[in-house]
Amino acid sequence: MPAYTLPGTEVGPARARLLGALVLALILLGVLAWRVVPASGPDDEVRVALLVGAVGAGIAPGTEVRLDGVRVGSVAEIGFAGIGRQRIALALDGSQLFGLTDAVSLDYAPGNLFGVSAVELHAGAGGTALADGATVDLTESVGRVHDATLSALLTATGRLTDEVLTPKLAELLSTVARDLTAFAPLFEAIGTTARSYTETRQLAPSFLFAQFGSALSGLPPMLTGSLTLLNAEYSNEYLSVPDQLTRFGAMFDGIQYQLLPTVTQLMSTSQRYFGGILPMLGLVLDRVAASVTDPERSAGELTELLGRLDAAFVDSPRGPVLRAGVTLDGVPALSGPLGALLGGGR
């Protein structure tokens, strides 16, 4: 069997050469068409150029472009536009722009959980609608370009660690933490007081603050009197006498070393022997208060009772006597003797 034939086929040398020449010609035509015929995008494609001061890490041709989270195109080209300026060419889908203007702002942000960067566009107020071939200069406006890529975040974190978290700052934080432990009992007392007040509060805070304020109104006179008392030792003519000043000092010594210790001992003894009575006293007062269902009515009735008792007593040479009258018309056996005893009345 010849080497150029295949079992079951009728391909000969001439036919094989013809088929090879046709295949080669088709390949050459396809390559020429790909290189010569210009690429044409979609009918509604809009190409926009953005001039920025810096390009975020990971931004390259083919990077997704999003408008408020929706993919609207991709980066077509990144080039040099002068010292400190770069040009980013975007190929956008015109049907997805929804009135995007040249007041647009730009963010370099991670496009997924793996940190792959993407270009985020945000529409701004006003401006002219973007048209095909438009160029937007973002280098003249501050705050319209933000770099929030993973690389920028890592760089900022490294700068924070290197410049802020210094040994001196760590020492300062340690000192502050150590000094704050001294205020822990005060903070605990404040917390306990606030919790106790919250759990037992029965009156409005405004009323309580008003009462506390009225109580504090007596503080200035007390301070003034204390200062006057201290100044009296040097300005009082009575105390200018040496003997009187000695007695005055002895009075304070007696208060400090005799009266106050005695009062303290008295209170301690009273607490030991009468401490159990206080809960009973509180219970009794609580029951007495509960027995008065209507305080206003009880106060009025008590006032009337006291007024009648006061009117029933009259003054006499032998002191106050009770003025009373007894009617005994229905008891003849007692009306006569009692009438004679009381002076002939009924």
Image: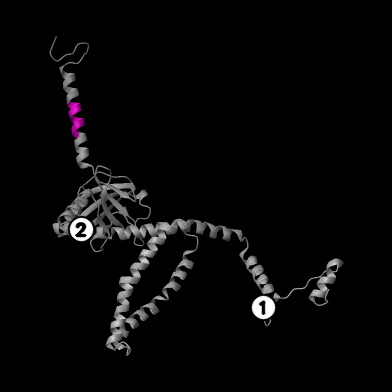
Q: Is residue 90 above or below residue 328?
A: above
The span shown in magenta is: 21-28
Confirm whether residue 249 shows in the render. Answer: yes
Quarter-of-image position of residue 296 = bottom right
Query: What amino acid type is highlighted by mark number 2?
Result: Leu
Asked whether residue 56 appears in the rendered view, the answer is: no
Q: Nearer the viewer, residue 26 or 133?
A: 133
Picture quadrant where residue 255 is located = bottom left
Badge 2: few (under 14), some or many (20 or more) residues near its Cα, within 10 Å?
Answer: few
Q: Position of residue 155 (x, y in %)?
A: 18, 52
Q: Nearer the viewer, mark 1 or mark 2?
A: 1
Return the residue at label 2: 173
Looking at the picture, which amino acid does disc 1 mark? Pro
Q: Quadrant of the N terminus?
A: top left
The residue under label 1 is 320
- Label 1 CA crowd tier, 10 Å (few <14, some 14–19, many 20+): few
**Residue 188 placed where, x, y %?**
33, 57
Q: Quadrant of the C terminus?
A: bottom right
Identity of the residue drawn at 54% across and 58% down? 284
Q: Mark 2: which secondary structure?
A: helix
The majority secondary structure of the magenta stretch comes to helix
Residue shown at the point (36%, 49%) measured from the top left = 96
Q: Is residue 206 left or right of residue 2?
A: right
